[in-house]
Amino acid sequence: MTDPISPDSTQFAPQTLAQWLAALETMHPKAMDLGLERVRQVADRMDLESTALRFVVAGTNGKGSTCAMLESILLAAGYRVGMYTSPHLIHFNERARINGDPAKDAQLIEAFETVNAARQGVSLTYFEFTTLAILWLFARAGLDAMILEVGLGGRLDAVNIVDADCAIVTSTDIDHTEWLGNTREAIALEKAHIFRAGRPAICSDPAIPQTLIDHAESIGADLWLFGRDFNYSGDRQQWGFAGRDHRRNALNYPALRGANQLLNACGVLAALDAVRDRMAIPQQAVRQGLLQAALPGRFQILPGQPLVVLDVAHNPHAAAVLEKNLSAMGFHPYTYAVFGMLADKDIDQVVRILAPRIDRWYCATLQGSRGVTGTVLKDRVQAALEAWLDDNPQHDEPLAEVLSYDSPHEAFDAARQAAAVDDRIVTFGSFMTVGDVLAHLGRA
């Protein structure tokens, strides 16, 4: 398979990072083309060898938080760390962090040029191309550890060309069914393929499907299960971690907000426990790392009034966590939702889950081939709310008001204008939704 735009063509001469990213969007005939054959073929021509300890993180939700806490703890312990996550909120550079700092444009351009030279006409998707570029960048950074977030699934994701020294599966739920299957069992099996024989395989999902366990055992992975091999306990002031034969007590709660973050933190500490013969982590580094971990858009609360919550929740599992977190907050007379989702997501179920918490919906247009206009989203939200009311006749309040806007930031401005100081605004549904609002607020 060759490129729609040949690398020898005069059309293919990007100079800036923005030009490169635009070119990569059209290089491959399909945006999503799962499989490792093409990406391995190019990787074999590149020098991607590194002595860094490699953590690979997969899961339906919780991947970003897990990566952020792992990075923060390793940095606090004095290690040189590279972290690759996706997608980004505002700037592509967010995807590649070296020692806590996003990669520079010049570094990424050099890496892209290297991948392009190694391709020799092999067509790569945007994700495959950029994954190889960032792996090449990390291989030259003198790292002690690299943290690699799987983009989608596990078995056929480009990140899976890397043999994990320690693999983490955070959670499994229904999402990306057209690629991964429509049951938790099928999806868990896809994610389990990041495990490697004889190496630690951490699963922090408390209700993991048997398929993951069976696969780990069939390949001889060193499987660590939440509730069996590691767990946590705590009170209002502090919490403690218990691994197979190692405990960490008197820990601060993670700086990342949300009821699910202890599960993510527990998975991180299990991973560090599993590799402690190669990478020692002092107790103070754990405390400091948990306190300093930051990740925009994961139940992020902005200072000021009205209260603003930003959350990239974009599937029913994440929506359920968001609903639980919202219900645990203090009283707010009204809650306004700035809501934008992609067409291939389960919009109806997300709306139904959050219906009890939202008083007014501000539906926003998202651009791109997968985007949904605010008008169409408004109709979907209204239909989902009506169905939810039919199923919950005890709910005696009227149907929430639903409005549409041309962009998330326009929807946000309208919500902020309507909200009183004691109300709250929840921006959610997509990385694109949260990213647009963050950029509008000047928090890039």
Image (cartoon, rainbow, N blue to C red):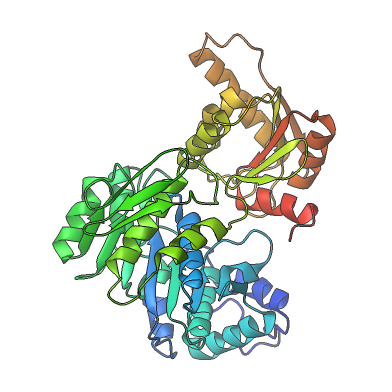
Q: Which is more toward the observer, 380 or 280?
A: 280
Q: Which is more toward the observer, 118 or 423?
A: 423
Note whether residue 123 is visible.
Answer: no
Q: For residue 154, what is the image quadrant?
A: bottom left
Question: 194 above or below 51?
Answer: above
Note whether residue 17 is visible.
Answer: yes
Tell me residue 414's x, y (percent). 82, 36
Tell me residue 420's x, y (percent). 80, 28
Residue at the (66%, 13%) spot, across then down: 398
Tell me residue 67's x, y (percent). 47, 62
Quadrant for the C terminus, please: bottom right
Tell me residue 71's x, y (percent). 49, 67
Q: Is residue 126 left or right of residue 434?
A: left
Question: 276 above or below 326?
Answer: below
Question: 417 above or below 28?
Answer: above
Q: Is residue 261 left or right of residue 444?
A: left
Q: Is residue 356 left or right of residue 46?
A: right
Q: Is residue 306 left or right of residue 37?
A: right
Q: For residue 223, what is the image quadrant?
A: bottom left
